[in-house]
Image (cartoon, rainbow, N blue to C red):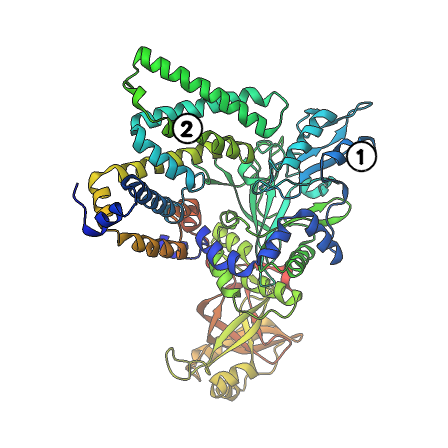
């Protein structure tokens, strides 16, 4: 159990050996590590990034920086920073002074900011020892819906894409502990997102008490807000658009394996923060699912377009939400139009005709009906032709005036021996506005991976060849959102 | 000590015996660091720091080595906390840090001489080994500045633990004697490290990190 689940998990060694190194060309990696170059590239592709106010490349430019021209709120970050270090968010300007206010209320003077920028220029926050460029850019204003989950900062979506397929997603939510940054290591919350629907699943944060690094604690609501909110089951707005942007970013950047960071701006919608050529592995914990087997499924797949990639992802990796509902209620989730397998009369497991003797079809889930139904032409095809003939020999009246009459007829019939071994009983039903009697047979059906014998009334042909009724729906929850897809 | 003919030949052909021993020690500790990183998953300050530390410990002795390490880190922390409040450039700050470090080490030697503290005979310690340990300060600060205090302490501890392990291995007479007389082990170490370099399995640390995924019962393969 422990081992098999662990086999699905992607470790650091394999990430580097099999994904980052072979799929991310050094040139592409260099681009992702350079925020300005990334912005330029994405702008060419028509993908929104946060607006740059000023670039400061050296001390001279810093000395001549016109502080007055800056807007009230902005962000200062290093061009080649790592792990969110060196990012300074300024919320507003102190009236009448050249001083700005940080999310925590701390006031920074022009001198403080100058020093911070000098540190950036010296490469203190950057990869390696190189000198760096400081970016002064627009502060993203959090989408009002997501705002209620986060403390001050901007929640940030991370989508891992591979081979033009979004593989796994999570949202990082700033907390009081993380001081408004969406950085897992400083205490932000990470919540997994179901790729199929954009609904949040599991949540975790770094364990505060544990001294060992990288130990996570699963949680189910925000931890330090005034009113804490439940984190699972939240629909991320604009989900399809977000997936589309993520895959477009991957295509543009030529990174084979990439983590795309997207924020939702209140006015502009999804904005790409940055591309990450070595996305972290904690996302697996937030989703309680392994990356390894997902990546292996996608490896070598020929994905024709962005839309195709998204469809593949939704089909293959969507459904964590349904699984987690199942975990809570012990029931499986099925759709209104659910794909089921019907087994023919002659079906025998392991026989050479095994595949011929079953058929995939769509069943209509009808909570208004009590017993499940199947159309006559279907059962005839399934090998019950003779059974149907036997029913016809009964020559029961075509219609009945009342259900009582019908029941009387059924009672009468039950006294006689059954005409066919497969007809287990007769049922009175309302069909096309008339009361009729129909045979009930047992049909072997596979619903949601489980084979069951269902009692089904054989009806005349109608819109739905197979209808699942209440009797057979006890073990399921019905998802109405996919009705017309 | 008697050497095999090949080793004997090397020593008489101009390879200083001490250098040979040191180079072997470097290879052994480097391999230990590589195993620690890719199989166990413990990060160190690069590969140079644990190697130099292990060798320094072999000169100072583990007890003295660890004592000096402690002094170096405490002084670094102290000086960093003080200097943080002063606006100054990074390298200048590190330079001040080294000056303070030098003073503290001198004070430490005097204190040990006066009060013993279970660390007698410190006067015989090699100066080069002491400054090798002092170099930890730079690594520590860099990590502290770029990541966090916690991560720096974490990496410091694993660096010291691995260096101590390296010290233990390279100071065993049996080990160094065996290695110096069986130099064919050197290409074997290369092959072994190439193998480690290809290893794509989960690190021991990954197993702990992702424990919750394997424990999640309702997590169906999807």
Above/below status of B202 relative to A121 = below
The reply to whether residue A109 is in sight is no
Instruction: Using the image, tell me which numbered label, if any, was put on residue B131.
Output: 2
Mark-to-mark CA distance, 1 and 2? 48 Å
Q: Quadrant of residue A23?
A: bottom right
Q: Residue at x 38, y 17 (%)?
A: B108
Q: Quadrant of residue A163?
A: bottom right
Above/below status of B191 relative to A406 = above
Q: Position of residue A418 (x, y in %)?
A: 43, 81
Instruction: Using the image, tell me which numbered label, if any, was put on residue A70.
Output: 1
Q: Position of residue A243 (x, y in %)?
A: 65, 57
Relative horizontal placement of residue A191, taking residue A6 as reference (left or right)? right
Instruction: Spot the residue most to the top.
Output: B114
**Chain under callout 2:** B
- Viewer-side residue, A345 vs A232: A232
Do discs 1 and 2 share a chain? no
């Amino acid at each position: 159990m422990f081992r098999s689940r662990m086999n699905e998990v992607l470790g650091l060694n394999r990430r580097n050996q099999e994904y980052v190194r072979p799929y991310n060309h050094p040139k592409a990696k260099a681009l992702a590590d350079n925020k300005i170059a990334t912005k330029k590239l994405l702008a060419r592709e028509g993908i929104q990034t946060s607006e740059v106010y000023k670039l400061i490349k050296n001390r001279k430019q810093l000395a001549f920086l016109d502080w007055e021209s800056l807007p009230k709120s902005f962000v200062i970050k290093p061009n080649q920073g790592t792990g969110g270090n060196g990012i300074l968010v300024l919320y507003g300007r102190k009236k009448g002074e050249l001083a700005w206010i940080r999310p925590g209320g701390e006031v920074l003077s022009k001198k403080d900011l100058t020093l911070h920028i000098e540190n950036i220029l010296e490469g203190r926050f950057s990869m390696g020892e190189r000198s760096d460029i400081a970016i002064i850019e627009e502060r993203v204003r959090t989408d009002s819906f997501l705002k209620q989950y986060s403390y001050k900062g901007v929640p940030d979506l991370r989508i891992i894409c591979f081979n033009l397929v979004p593989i796994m997603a999570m949202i990082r939510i700033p907390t009081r502990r993380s001081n408004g940054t969406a950085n897992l290591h400083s205490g932000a919350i990470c919540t997994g997102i179901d790729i199929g629907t954009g609904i949040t699943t599991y949540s975790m944060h770094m364990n505060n008490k544990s001294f060992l690094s990288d130990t996570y604690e699963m949680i189910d609501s925000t931890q330090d807000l005034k009113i804490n909110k439940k984190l699972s089951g939240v629909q991320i707005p604009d989900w399809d658009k977000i997936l589309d942007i993520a895959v477009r970013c991957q295509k543009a950047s030529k990174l084979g394996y990439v983590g795309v960071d997207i924020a939702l701006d209140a006015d502009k919608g999804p904005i790409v923060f940055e591309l990450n050529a070595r996305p972290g592995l904690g996302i697996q914990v937030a989703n309680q699912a392994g990356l390894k087997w997902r990546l292996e499924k996608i490896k070598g797949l020929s994905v024709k377009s962005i839309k195709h990639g998204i469809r593949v992802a939704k089909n293959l990796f969507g459904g964590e939400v349904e699984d987690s509902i199942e975990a809570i209620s012990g029931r499986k989730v099925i759709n209104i139009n659910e794909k089921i397998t019907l087994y023919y009369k002659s079906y025998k497991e392991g026989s050479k005709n095994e595949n011929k003797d079953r058929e995939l079809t769509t069943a209509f889930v009808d909570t208004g009906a009590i017993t499940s139904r199947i159309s006559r032409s279907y059962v005839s095809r399934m090998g019950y032709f003779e059974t149907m003939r036997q029913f016809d020999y009964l020559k029961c009246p075509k219609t009945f005036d009342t259900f009582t009459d019908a029941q009387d007829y059924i009672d009468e019939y039950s006294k006689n021996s059954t005409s066919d071994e497969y007809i287990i009983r007769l049922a009175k039903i309302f069909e096309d506005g008339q009361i009729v009697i129909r045979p009930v047979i047992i049909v072997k059906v596979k619903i949601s991976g489980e084979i069951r014998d269902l009692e089904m009334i054989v009806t005349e042909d109608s819109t739905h060849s197979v209808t699942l009724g209440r009797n057979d729906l006890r073990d399921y929850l019905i998802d109405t959102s996919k009705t017309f897809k | 000590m008697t050497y095999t003919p090949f080793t004997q030949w090397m020593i008489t052909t101009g390879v200083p015996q001490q250098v040979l021993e040191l180079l072997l020690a470097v290879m052994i500790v480097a391999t230990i660091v590589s195993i620690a990183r890719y199989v166990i998953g413990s990060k160190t300050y690069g590969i140079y720091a644990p190697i130099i530390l292990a060798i320094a410990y072999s000169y100072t002795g583990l007890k003295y080595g660890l004592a000096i390490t402690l002094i170096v880190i405490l002084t670094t922390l102290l000086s960093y906390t003080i200097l943080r409040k002063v606006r100054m450039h990074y390298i200048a700050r590190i330079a001040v840090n080294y000056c303070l470090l030098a003073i503290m080490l001198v004070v430490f030697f005097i204190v040990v001489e006066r009060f013993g503290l279970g660390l007698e005979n410190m006067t015989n310690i090699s100066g080069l080994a002491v400054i090798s340990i002092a170099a930890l300060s730079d690594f520590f600060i860099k990590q502290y500045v770029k990541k966090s205090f916690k991560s720096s302490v974490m990496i410091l501890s694993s660096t010291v633990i691995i260096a101590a392990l390296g010290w233990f291995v390279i100071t065993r007479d049996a080990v160094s004697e065996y290695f110096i007389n069986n130099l064919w082990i050197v290409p074997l170490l290369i092959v072994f490290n190439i193998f480690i370099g290809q290893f794509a399995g989960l690190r021991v640390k990954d197993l702990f990190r992702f424990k919750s995924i394997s424990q999640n019962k309702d997590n169906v393969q999807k």
